[in-house]
Image (cartoon, rainbow, N blue to C red):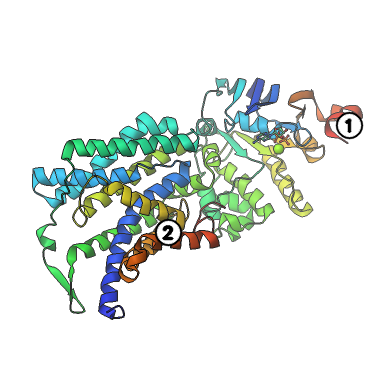
Amino acid sequence: MFTDPTFLFIQTLNGLQLAMLLFLLSVGLSVIFGLMNFINLAHGTLYMLGAYFGLWVYVNTGSFWVALALAPIGVMVVGMVFYVTLIKRLRTAPPLKQVLVTFGLIFVGLDAVRMSWGNLSKSIPTPDVFSQSVTIFGEIYPSYRLFIIGLGVAVFVILYFVLERTRIGSVIRAGVDDRDMVSCLGINVDLAFFGVFCIGCYLAGLSGAVAGAVFPVEPGMDMSILILTLIVVVVGGLGSLKGAVVGSLMIGMAETFGQVFLPQFASVTIYALMVVVLLVRPGGLFPTRAA
Amino acid sequence: MSKVLLEVDKLQAWYDQSHILQGVSISVTEGTVLSVLGRNGAGKTTLLNSIMAVLKKRKGRVTYAGKDIQSLQSYQIASLGIAYVPETRGIFPSLSVRENLEIAARAPITSGQREAWSLEKVYKLFPRLEERAENGGGQLSGGEQQMLSIARALMTNPDLLILDEPTEGLAPLVVQEIEAFLTELKQKGLTMLLVEQSLGFATSLADDIVILGKGKIRWAGAPSELAKDPKIQHTWLGV
Ligand SMILES: Nc1ncnc2c1ncn2[C@@H]1O[C@H](COP(=O)(O)OP(=O)(O)O)[C@@H](O)[C@H]1O
Ligand SMILES: [Mg+2]
């Protein structure tokens, strides 16, 4: 069965779907880090909040689409509050402090979620449009997963266009290269950073809301995804869109195929991959700054 | 009546614990060129970084066009009409040459006397940059990087141009080319603060000279006076 092309194709789709969720998460984390050297370990918490906000809106409105539209915005607002109250002050702090504070936020997030929604695993039902499965090479495949893949591709195309073709994109890329120089040209880099931070939070929330319909919505969903996301960022290289894409694809595929082909090693496949990449390229595959 | 554009008064600056600038005062008059000379390690770059607020640990008073800019951030200082060509040139490798220029484009603060710079005009001044417009900033030679850094500074349409050793480490032909550009800019009436290690071009372009040594001003005067003072040159410039 492992060489059956249909099976391989279905697994590739599963890998792609995970890769797209990872991409939505890692792109924000990576560009924020590249731009401001700021490590936000609570990025997974934003993903979890996205899932819970989505669930909450769904329960109250009965509409998946409204949930998908509002949840990321809610997460972005939470992110903005954190930015103004904490992150702004932490920007110039040494990395250890950033790690400690954002690590602490993980626990705050966990408890907040437990208090509001309890410990039980929940899920967001997919809308009727996706109730039909599609048949691919004679295999039944849930159409919602194809939607996730399409969404990831769409976000990539938009981000690529903004980063490569607009002035704000140039400012962000230049800011990753040399923040001080951008400032010395009269451009408010902090404002650009705030914008990137908000988009990063939005995408993390979007990722969580989308994932809430395929993975269980439960406290702790943030940690498993955070680790994968950090590995994506390290493998892909800090600060680049390209790195986030390639890293997500590699880790999404390695995680999916690792569980199928090497179940006994499933937990180490991605770490092994990371070690190999870092041995060959210590800065990751597409670092924006020399490592 | 010519007025003082940039005034630095008893400026002190630190890197962590080391006290680098120990009370530096300079002033740049509108329409003139001030050259700051001094040996390697004298504190010239530190002075410029302090003016631009790239270096934040500093004390004293910096005013620009009569306005206190000491408490402003770099981007606010730059947007008052100051452009900086740093020693490291600060080219963005992730951006193409054209994007490096476009990102800086800004309308002039003071309307009037000088014509505004545009992409076409800087390409005319530096045809090499137009040839390499779509190349990445990281693919340029040292001379091209320096031209791009100066051209990019001009794109902000500054009233004051600050340059840190613009000819350092470049081939003689390129040095001549850059010196010719700067001379042309001066003729157009642009105010400049030019840092160099030694006499030569800086003295021929300058209206006034100050010599910085070990974080203090050691000498100030006209270029012609400095030429007549071999002792000062020997002590603080090592000639
Ligand atoms: N980033 C830094 N950290 C600590 N010391 C520095 C740093 N940059 C420069 N210095 C020190 O400050 C002094 C002045 O340096 P600088 O302003 O670069 O001199 P110049 O531009 O005149 O060659 C030197 O003694 C140098 O070693
Ligand atoms: Mg220097």
Q: Name the mark on residue A271.
A: 2
Residue A274 image-quadrant placement: bottom left
Q: Residue at x 74, y 32 (%)?
A: B35
Q: Which residue is located at x 47 percent, y 51 percent?
A: A238
Q: Is residue B110 left or right of residue B7?
A: left
Q: Nearer the viewer, residue A145 or B48?
A: A145
Instruction: Say what amino acid the circle numbered 2 marks.
Output: Tyr
Q: Are marks 1 and 2 in contact (CB under 8 Å)?
A: no
Find residue A136 and name its label.
none
What is the x, y in percent for residue B58? 61, 24
For residue B234, which numbered disc appears in the image? 1
Residue A162 locus on image (x, y percent): 38, 52
Secondary element at tag 1: helix
**Which quadrant contains ligand 2?**
top right
**Amino acid carrying mark 1 in the image:** His
- What is the quadrant of residue B188 in the picture? top right
Q: Indicate whether B226 appears above or below A239.
A: above
Furthest-front residue in this view? A264
User: Residue A177: x and y, percent?
Assistant: 53, 48
- Which residue is at a point 26% across and 62% down the rendered structure image? A150
* Chain holding disc 1: B
Whole-percent x and y of residue A218? 21, 47
- Between residues A273 and A149, which one lies in front from this camera angle? A273
Q: State the SS at label 2.
A: helix
Ligand 1 within 8 A of label 2's CB?
no
Between A102 and A62, which is closer to the camera in this rendering?
A: A102
Q: Is residue B8 above or below residue A66?
A: above
